[in-house]
Image (spheres, grey):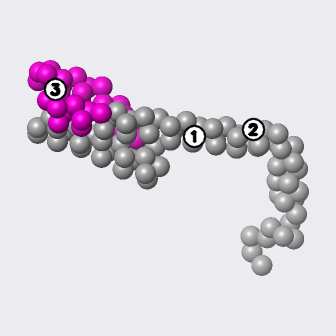
Amino acid sequence: MPRRAALNALTVALAAAGDARDWVALDRAVGALGTDLRVLAASGPWSAPETRALAALRAQHDKAAELCAAELDALEAQMNHMHTNKAGFIAYALDNDTDTERNQAYP
């Protein structure tokens, strides 16, 4: 596969995984970058179109990193909320666990 097409495929993979919020696919795509780019770079100097494709890949990688950072911030906020309200969650769970009239398995 020509280098420009390979770079475009890597960019598309990053974009698709990020847009879908598919963290496993995003991890896989980012993990492949190091090896793939070393193999591509071994073919010699980059042409102008390849350099543009490489810049687009870098921009998509930056976007993926920002997306991950935002998701991490949201997860941290959710975890902090759960930690702050842990006693309330436990009390609610215990109350509902012992309320046999509301939690009948069979009518």
Q: Is residue 10 left or right of residue 97?
A: left
Q: Nearer the viewer, mark 3 or mark 2?
A: 3
In the depicted view, which residue is nearer to us: 34 or 90? 34
Disc 1 marks which residue? 70
49 within the magenta span = yes
Query: Dot 1 surroundings within 10 Å: few (below 14), some, or many (20 or more)?
Result: few
Disc 2 marks which residue? 80
Q: Residue at x 43, y 46 (%)?
A: 18
* Relative height, residue 31 to residue 106 (above, below): above
Q: Position of residue 11 (x, y in %)?
A: 30, 41
In the depicted view, which residue is nearer to us: 22 or 10? 10
* Relative height, residue 71 to residue 45 (above, below): below
Query: Dot 3 surroundings within 10 Å: few (below 14), some, or many (20 or more)?
Result: some
C-alpha span from label 1 to label 2: 15 Å
Mark 1 or 3 closer to N-term? Answer: 3
Q: Is residue 35 left or right of residue 30?
A: left
Please identify the quadrant where the N terminus is shown.
top left
User: Is residue 33 at least partly visible in the picture?
Assistant: yes
* Relative height, residue 33 to residue 23 (above, below): above
Residue lying furthest bottom: 107
Disc 3 marks which residue? 46
Q: Secondary structure at mark 3?
A: loop
C-alpha span from label 1 to label 3: 33 Å
Residue 6, image quadrant? top left
Q: Main secondary structure of the magenta part?
A: helix
Please identify the quadrant where the C terminus is shown.
bottom right
Residue type, numbered disc 2: Asn
Q: Residue at x 50, y 41 (%)?
A: 67
